[in-house]
């Protein structure tokens, strides 16, 4: 994807890192995908889908906006949740602008107020994106905007529907106006820092979230052990890690049916993304209580 056919940056070029901040399931990943017009971040109805910070690099002749889709803010500071909290803090520390995302059909909750307390200690400009306006009653929107305006000195407040891509252009304009003068950090045709290997692993994890229930999505991880890009075929071997033998049986399913569904659905998405035929091999393994152990988390690349 190239933003422009002939790219000449403006003399007064602006650039910076923009964090998408919010509690789990407010639509951060959906918004990133809508902005980039690409499925960079997996989206599921389950909260806390995003685990690692993903960059979406939006470049135009006037500016380069580097969006950071970080995990939703969590309170627990142990195990995997401690890693997620560190990812959020890293993104906040490196951001030039912060976009706080809230839901249009709910008044500010305690979780939002806690976020505002953290934001009051920072110097970065903060833009409020009120998401899911397509699901909210219109008479409730103006009072909600007024309530947030009284709570915090936002640089701008923008109602949006990330799912329908409504209001996204207005949000982009506000973000671009808040960016400092700066260099181009990435080539103009680069849209993310994530590798194809990583994104394919995320496609497998997405299917686990969509097809399994209860605690299985949260106690599973996908590590791509082999990624061979051949002439017309990509060979991928990935390990699906779970915490217990019982979880392994659920992911595999009776007669291997669940694992086949996970693999088949993920493979179709991989082939559309890579533009090549994919040979995908999945293996389910057990690492006891890996989400609760800092040592095991490091072994699996969560640092």
Image: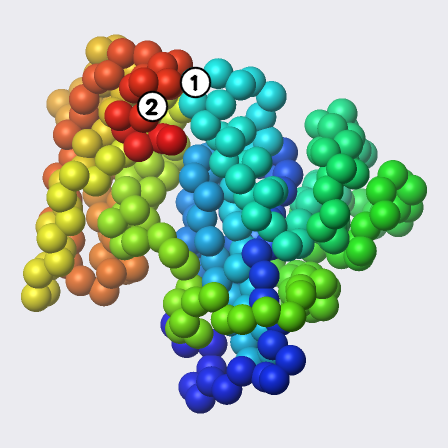
Which mark is drawn over residue 24?
A: none
Element on which disc 2 rests = helix
Marks 2/1: CA–CA distance:
7 Å
Which residue is depicted at the point 53% across and 82% down? 9
Is 154 drawn above or below residue 48 in the view shown? below
Regarding residue 13, the answer to whether it shows in the image is yes
Which mark is drawn over residue 79?
A: 1
Q: Which residue is mark 2?
A: 297
Question: In the figure, residue 237 lies in which quadrant?
Answer: top left
Camera-side residue of 215 and 177: 177
> In the rendering, at what x and y percent does residue 234 appear?
13, 55
Is 20 drawn above or below residue 239 in the view shown? below
Camera-side residue of 226 and 193: 193
> In the rendering, at what x and y percent does residue 192 appear?
41, 59
The residue positioned farthest toward the left in the image shown: 231
In the picture, measured across the screen, residue 229 lies left or right of residue 39, that is left
Q: Earlier in the sequence, mark 2 or mark 1?
A: 1
Camera-side residue of 40 and 74: 74
Q: Quadrant of the C terminus?
A: top left
Which residue is depicted at the point 39% across and 67% down? 190
> In the rendering, at what x and y percent does residue 95 appear?
60, 50
């Amino acid at each position: 994807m190239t933003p422009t056919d002939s790219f000449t940056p403006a003399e007064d070029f602006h650039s910076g890192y923009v964090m998408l901040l919010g509690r789990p399931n407010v639509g951060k990943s959906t918004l990133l995908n809508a902005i980039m017009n690409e499925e960079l971040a997996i989206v599921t109805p389950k909260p806390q889908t995003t685990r690692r910070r993903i960059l979406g690099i939006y470049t135009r002749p006037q500016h380069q906006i580097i969006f950071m889709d970080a995990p939703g803010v969590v309170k627990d500071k142990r195990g995997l949740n401690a890693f997620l909290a560190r990812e959020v803090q890293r993104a906040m520390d490196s951001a030039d602008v912060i976009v706080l995302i809230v839901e249009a059909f709910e008044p500010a909750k305690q979780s939002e107020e806690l976020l505002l307390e953290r934001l009051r200690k920072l110097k970065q400009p903060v833009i409020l994106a009120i998401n899911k306006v397509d699901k909210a009653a219109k008479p409730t929107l103006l009072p909600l905007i007024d309530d947030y305006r009284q709570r915090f000195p936002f640089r701008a407040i923008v109602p949006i529907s990330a799912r329908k891509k409504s209001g996204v252009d207005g949000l982009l304009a506000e973000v671009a106006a808040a960016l400092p003068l700066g260099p181009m950090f990435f080539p103009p045709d680069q849209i993310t820092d994530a590798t194809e290997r990583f994104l394919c692993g995320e496609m497998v994890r997405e299917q686990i979230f969509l097809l399994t229930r209860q605690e299985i999505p949260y106690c599973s991880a996908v590590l791509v052990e082999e990624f061979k890009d051949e002439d017309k075929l990509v060979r991928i071997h990935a390990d699906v890690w779970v915490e217990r033998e019982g979880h392994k049986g659920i992911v595999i399913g009776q007669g291997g049916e669940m694992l086949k569904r996970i693999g088949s659905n993920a493979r179709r998405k991989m082939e559309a993304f890579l533009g090549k035929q994919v040979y995908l091999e999945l293996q389910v393994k057990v690492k006891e209580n890996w989400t609760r152990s800092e040592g095991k988390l490091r072994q699996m690349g969560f640092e």
